[in-house]
Amino acid sequence: MARFRNVYAVCRLPFATMTATIPENAPDHCPGVESDQAGKADACGGCANQEICASNKPKGPDPALPLIRERMRHVKKKILVLSGKGGVGKSTFTAQLGWAFAADENLQTGIMDVDICGPSIPTILGIANEQVHSSASGWSPVYVQDNLGVMSVGFMLPSAKDAIMWRGPKKNGLIAQFLKDVDWGELDWLVIDTPPGTSDEHLSVVQYLKESGIDGAVLVTTPQEVALQDVRREIDFCRKVGVRIIGLVENMAGFVCPKCKNKSEIFRPTTGGAARLARECGVELLGSVPLDPRIGKSADYGVSFIDEYPDSPATTAFLDIIERIQSIVEQDRPL
């Protein structure tokens, strides 16, 4: 347990406050008091809380929910960015979305990175060396600029090389902490970057924001079938948990050579790409973003691609997609 406490030393908060579903004296690999395996799992053997956890007494409502509801009362619109497959550019798209929203100085934007095992948002936004600070009003986000704040577990690691090896309850506790204890202030947009797949982090975000409401999810994919098949599962997830799908973004859709201007399909859409998937599943294709090597370069250097390369076809595609997202969300939730 001691090594996990060190992860949060910069926040000056005890580890017990980070994981509300895990007792402070719990053993490693504790499934959490809200799990069906509470008191029954192998890890529970010898724990002082085993008898209490294994009892059939009904568990009360999560004490974090009213605190989350109060924090989220000050957030106008909340968007999830999802991907079924890793490596499709989801976090890069999240960063461009945040930068584009924040380009309007009258809008306050937040990015919450819940990709706990692979937090790349701090690097992409150029704030990887920053730390989180706490005050009487909660944790303060790290600011990229005056109207763009960010929260990520990446700010809390002693080293960028440190692996986070957590089971679900510890991840859930951190997500709850991000939602209830981060002092976001008044936000127009909160963009939540999630890990690939449909696992603990996704379920936790949906559960914790059920009362506050999620305005929708943007799904990011690449054109080839191996990515699309996972997006089909992501679409099914959204429909099962009741999250509206704003639309689908096809990333890395072809490459136009800057010299000869010929177009190559690096990731060939052998089954029709995102356009066919969108038609089959009844979701909107928000747009396709072509490959541009400078996108990766911008992410490595932590600068805004859409600001650095305004003449790129990829920038035009990003901005068209982002404008469409704003239009869809705001037609139901006017400012």
Image (cartoon, rainbow, N blue to C red):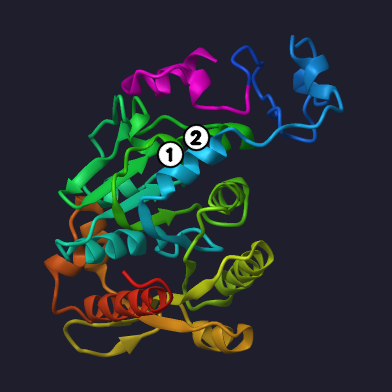
Q: Amino acid at mark 1?
A: Phe
For the image shown, how many numbered marks are present on the structure?
A: 2
Q: Is residue 9 left or right of residue 37?
A: left
Query: Residue tagged by mark 1?
Result: 178
Answer above or below: position of 316 versus 86.
Answer: below
Whether residues under marks 2 and 1 lie with C-beta atoms below 8 angstroms apart, the answer is yes
Q: Nearer the viewer, residue 200 or 270?
A: 200
The amino acid type found where label 2 is placed reads Leu
Label 1: few (<14), some (14–19) or many (≥20) C-alpha neighbours in 10 Å: many
Q: Residue at x 40, y 73 (%)?
A: 329
Which residue reaches farthest right?
A: 56
Kindly identify which residue carries mark 2: 174
**3D distance between C-alphas at marks 2 and 1:** 6 Å
* Position of 320 relative to 214 (above/below): below
Horizontal relation, residue 309 to residue 165: left or right: left
Q: Is residue 16 magenta?
A: yes
Instruction: Read off the magenta span.
Output: 1-22
